[in-house]
Amino acid sequence: MIPADAFAPHPRPYRVVQWATGTLGRCLIRGVLDRPDMELAGAWVHTPAKAGVDAGTLAGRAPAGVTATRDLQDVLDLDADCVVYAPTPALDRYAELDLICALLSSGKNLISTNGYVYPHAHGPQFVTELEQACKRGGASVHGSGVSSGFMADVMPLVLSRLSRGITHVYARECSDFARHPSWQMVHHTVGFGKDEDAYLRALRPNRTAMRALFAESLHLVAAGLGADLDEIDMDVEHRLARTDLATAAGPIPRGTVAAARWTFSGLVSGRPVITVEIVHKADAAAMPDEWGGPGYSLRVDGRPALTLTADENWVSDPIAGAAAHVLNSVPVVCAAPPGIRTYLDLPMICGRMRI
């Protein structure tokens, strides 16, 4: 349980380390610099060219007095309350487990933007290693974000409060990447701009990564609704660009992959009880007929049945929204007892009003 006095005003700003400085990571740095209750304690970077550069400069701000590093030991040695972990999504969750455990064992809470919303989905050994690292460091680990970490899991659970006798939960997200500035995300992670053969060659490891990520969301929803999933079924389809597309992250040539739909179904006794559908489009305006338009749709089949929909304008800046969700979690996670802290373990995480 969370102690009753756990959310009293913190005596000093939370010292936050930013792990990786891609598009989201830079937004997170700006968010930390803008909050009076936080200060930037460190920054880890992936590319050698960024090492030694001031983190404020990397984020497009004035120098913050924090030099970016590529050395894990530099981060482990820091006096910090929390690491915000925002690298490219891992293809193999176990491959990064030693790193996550090292950060936790050093006494730093960790909030991830890619996974860890429900680590129990990866089995008892995975959970045991995380819990032992949390115990060694007196720290907690938590997963946050928008797709996984909010719309695919937290919002269905919030909506389910208004229904009973629930038989099925459905969540759909359609993302338009036309204005997304990250080449790494659009071309590498999502795979747009590849010819069909190259896309299919990369699909096997990408299937593993996507299953690992969204299996957590399905298991989190199931746990919140008191269900045990027998298995998770996954399907993926893709479409090719019918014309050359110009996106913020670079061109998507005609005939290359420009849209994909991932469907994840949590099964009980062979019947889907939780379904998450993730649609990615390189340019939604140029591909209006592929699997509907951008936005979100949530449906809970129960008594009463509930539906919540939002178009692509539901958030003015999705990257800033993801960053805000993470940073709003920092005080709650730092105050929580050591261990794995999912949405089910934490009180409501809210933003702060500026008056």
Image (cartoon, grey):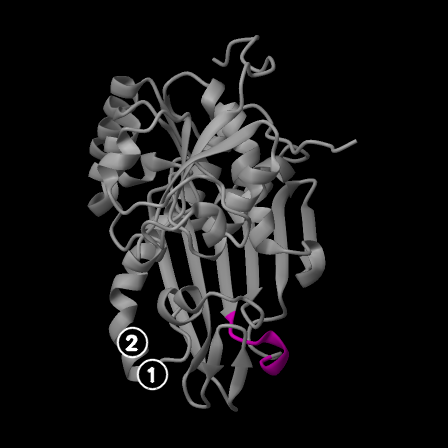
Counting from the top left corner in percent of width and height, residue 310 is at 69, 56
Q: Which residue is mark 2?
A: 200
Counting from the top left corner in percent of width and height, residue 43 is at 38, 42
Counting from the top left corner in percent of width and height, residue 315 is at 67, 54
Are there few (<14), some (14-19), or many (20+) residues within 10 Å of tag 2? some
Q: Amino acid at mark 2?
A: Leu
Counting from the top left corner in percent of width and height, residue 197 is at 28, 83
Q: Which residue is mark 1?
A: 196
The answer to whether residue 275 of the structure is visible from this angle is no
Q: Confirm whether the magenta stretch covers residue 284.
A: yes
For residue 314, above or below residue 349: below
Q: Confirm whether the magenta stretch covers residue 1.
A: no
Mark 1 touches mark 2? (CB < 8 Å): yes
Q: Amino acid at mark 1?
A: Glu
What residue lies at 62% left-to-right and 66% top-to-bottom? 294
User: Does residue 19 appear to the left or right of 56 in the view shown?
Assistant: left
In what element is the residue under mark 1? helix
For residue 198, above or below residue 27: below
Tell me the quarter of the image containing the C terminus: top right
Q: Which residues are magenta?
A: 281-287
What residue lies at 51% left-to-right and 67% top-to-bottom? 181
For residue 178, above or below residue 117: below
- The foreground one among 20 and 218 is 20
